[in-house]
Structure formats: structure tokens, C-alpha cells
Image (cartoon, grey):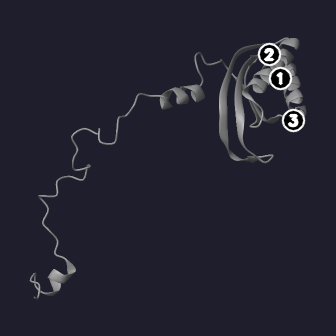
């Protein structure tokens, strides 16, 4: 059977628990039509690039599907009917990725260790601009006009 990666976006005002229920219902649609869902990933609420039906954010969910094309078409039909689903994207792939998807890897990378306080940047007292002692001092505009001497 063909393999698919399926991502759907749910409205931001539904709860995470309701998104889980939607995911369970959509898995049931696939399994009822002779397919199986290998992996599901909830990516959380993310900002949208542009508004979709007056929504600025959405819940993102990924399903790795192993099912006939008719099962995927039925899933997309059910999602078009559901008012909580904003958008759907289904891609046919040669094989499913093992481990977490790129979206979850990005989240793990954001959770890296602490970088320390601002003052904890090593021994860079010059803030990366190099030493100023070796540069000649530029004269100020008043010094240029009077040859470097000020009038009293």
C-alpha cells in the first residue's frame, strides 16, 4: 500500500484534548477503509503565515499513513466537512521517517542548554570591537577649527 504523510490544521480555539479526539476519529476513518496510521505527532499551536478563515494560529498534527488512495480521499472528505479543520496537506512518500519529524527536532533544538547571563560571554571586555588603544584619536570639530587649541 502507498505511504502518506498527512498534516492537518485545526482552529486555535479548540483545546488540545479536542484535537486528540479529532486525531482519534481520523485514525478510525483510515482503519475503517483498510489502512493504518503508523505515527502521530502533535506539533502544538503555531502562528500561520497568513490568516485562514480569520484565524492567525492553528493546532498542527502529523499522521503517517499506510493506506489505499480511497481511504485517504475519504479522510480528506471528512476533514473538509469538519468545521474545526482549517487546512489539510497529504503527500505521498517513498518511506516514513524514523524518529521525530523535523518540526519536533526544531523544538528539541530550541530547548538547548542555558547560554548564561549577559555578562557570562567569556573574557571579552571589549565587546568584540577590538582594542581602541591602538587607534589614533580623531580630533573633534572644535579642535579642527582652532588647530587643536581651545580659546579661553
- Mark 2, residue position: 67
Crowding at mark 3 (Cα within 10 Å: few <14, some 14-19, many 20+): few
Q: Position of residue 91 (x, y in %)?
A: 73, 28
Please say whether residue 68 is visible from this viewpoint.
Answer: no
Between residue 18 and residue 132, name the one nearer to us: 18
Reply above or below: 38 against 13. above
Which SS class for mark 3?
loop
Which residue is at a point 10% across and 81% down the rendered structure image? 148
- Mark 1, residue position: 72
Residue depth check, mark 2 versus mark 3: number of the one nearer the observer: 3
User: Marks 2 and 3, Cα distance to the nearest angstrom?
Assistant: 24 Å
**Which quadrant: the N terminus?**
top right
Mark sitting earlier along the chain (1/3):
1
Between residue 112 and residue 5, name the one nearer to us: 112
Which mark is on residue 83?
Answer: 3
Which residue is at a point 26% across and 49% down the rendered structure image? 127
User: Marks 2 and 1, Cα distance to the nearest angstrom?
Assistant: 7 Å
Mark sitting earlier along the chain (2/1):
2
Q: Position of residue 57 (x, y in %)?
A: 70, 41
Between residue 33 and residue 130, name the one nearer to us: 130
Reply above or below: 93 against 32. below
Which SS class for mark 2?
loop
In the image, 70: left or right of 104? right
Q: Position of residue 77 (x, y in %)?
A: 89, 29
Residue depth check, mark 1 versus mark 3: number of the one nearer the observer: 3
Reply above or below: 144 against 112. below
**Which quadrant: the C terminus?**
bottom left
Q: Position of residue 46 (x, y in %)?
A: 65, 37
In the image, 119: left or right of 110? left
Amino acid at each position: 500500500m502507498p505511504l502518506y504523510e498527512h498534516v492537518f490544521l485545526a482552529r486555535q480555539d479548540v483545546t488540545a484534548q479536542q484535537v486528540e479526539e479529532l486525531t482519534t476519529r481520523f485514525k478510525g476513518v483510515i482503519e475503517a477503509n483498510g489502512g493504518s496510521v503508523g505515527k502521530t505527532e502533535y506539533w502544538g499551536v503555531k502562528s500561520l503565515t497568513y490568516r485562514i478563515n480569520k484565524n492567525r494560529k492553528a493546532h498542527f498534527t502529523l499522521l503517517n499513513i499506510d493506506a489505499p488512495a480511497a481511504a485517504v480521499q475519504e479522510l480528506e472528505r471528512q476533514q473538509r466537512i469538519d468545521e474545526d479543520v482549517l487546512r489539510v496537506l497529504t503527500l505521498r512518500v517513498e518511506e516514513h521517517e524514523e524518529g521525530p519529524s523535523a518540526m519536533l527536532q526544531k523544538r528539541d533544538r530550541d530547548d538547548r542548554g542555558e547560554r548564561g547571563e549577559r555578562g557570562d560571554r567569556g573574557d571579552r571586555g571589549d565587546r568584540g570591537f577590538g582594542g581602541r588603544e591602538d587607534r589614533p584619536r580623531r580630533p573633534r570639530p572644535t579642535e579642527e577649527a582652532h588647530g587643536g587649541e581651545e580659546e579661553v
